[in-house]
Amino acid sequence: FWLKTSRAHPYSRAPRAPTHSLSSHLRSGELGSPPSTAPGAAAAAAAAAPRATASLKRPLLEKPLEHLVAVVCGADGDRSLRAAAALPRGEVALIAEAPLLLVPENPLGLVCRAPGAQALLQAGAALGTYRSLGAYAAYAMADEETRRIVDCFRADPSPVQRKVQSSVDRLLALEPSFAATADWPQLVRLHGILNTNAVRLRDGALALYAKICLASHSCDPNCEVVEAAELYGTAWPGDPRTALLRAKRPLRAGEELTISYVPAMVLQAPRQNRRALLRTLRGFSCRCLMCGRSTSTRSSK
């Protein structure tokens, strides 16, 4: 019951320290510009390997334009991302950040490293799955500041979340002794936070990002979430689990930044099918422009 897209989040919390800062790989004032090359050298290089260059072509490292992103808090407490100024072109990175929490597709190893691991393993065996314990274990291993940021996220009620709650209720009814093995309300809450907000990475892990995961859903999103290592390969100097929020097209000042919470193939499905899937997995009815309403959809952030 974990479904995330490439929007498509972390739970190895601390990013690896890069040997060089990202800015040291960029030319100041010219976003994504290649280093200058003498005309003769450029011609010689092109003649030497005209095909290899094309086959290995990747986008140049770009400095994220984070000053163009504003976090806005609505009257109901929901947070969203908006463009602080107009962006005249797309295919530009707006945010780059390492995950707060990271839960692998198979979180058994994570659970084994968490405080109270033995009790959690027993609880997982009784539940018949360790998936619901992954977020709880990652949170238990996080520092105080990370927990504070995670606690600012909210979980939408959904059939998936109700199923987890029902499983926990059945376990505690059958085995009351397990009540002391974990903070079960906290476990269910953290499962809901990831189910509502996290990003699914290429390897199946779920990642929660402090800003990127505030983006609302739209079936016609103006942004996308891409793993830095996927986009730049070995040229990326930082944490390989860093995600980029990239604008897909030009943005107006004040425009809400949206991503897709479902895979691209789902966006091609009929409206009723898309909305039904989002209700089941995320607990909300889509109200984006493609679904016939005037506002983008968001879950609780």
Image (cartoon, rainbow, N blue to C red):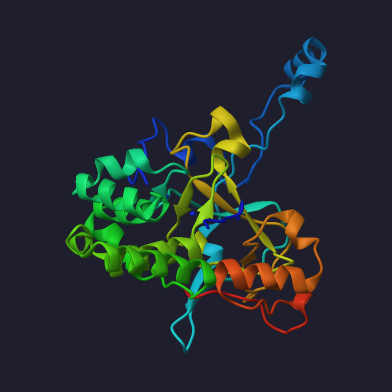
Residue 249 x/y as whole percent: 74, 60
Q: Nearer the viewer, residue 110 or 260?
A: 110
- Write the residue at 54% across / 46% down: 201
Residue 138 x/y as whole percent: 32, 51
Residue 129 x/y as whole percent: 41, 50
Answer with left or right where residue 14 lies relative to residue 6.
Answer: left
- Write the residue at 45% across / 37% down: 238
Q: Nearer the viewer, residue 64 or 115?
A: 115
Residue 234 x/y as whole percent: 55, 28
Answer with left or right where residue 124 lies relative to residue 159.
Answer: left
Q: Quadrant of residue 81?
A: bottom right
- Going by the picture, which residue comes out furthest to the bottom? 75
Q: Is residue 66 visible?
A: yes
Answer with left or right where residue 263 lies relative to residue 142.
Answer: right
Q: Is residue 85 visible?
A: no
The number of callouts visible is 0
- Going by the picture, which residue comes out furthest to the front? 174
Q: Nearer the viewer, residue 92 or 41?
A: 92
Q: Quadrant of residue 164?
A: bottom left
Picture layout, residue 266 above or below residue 257: above
- Write the residue at 78% across / 72% down: 271
Picture layout, residue 83 above or below residue 249: below
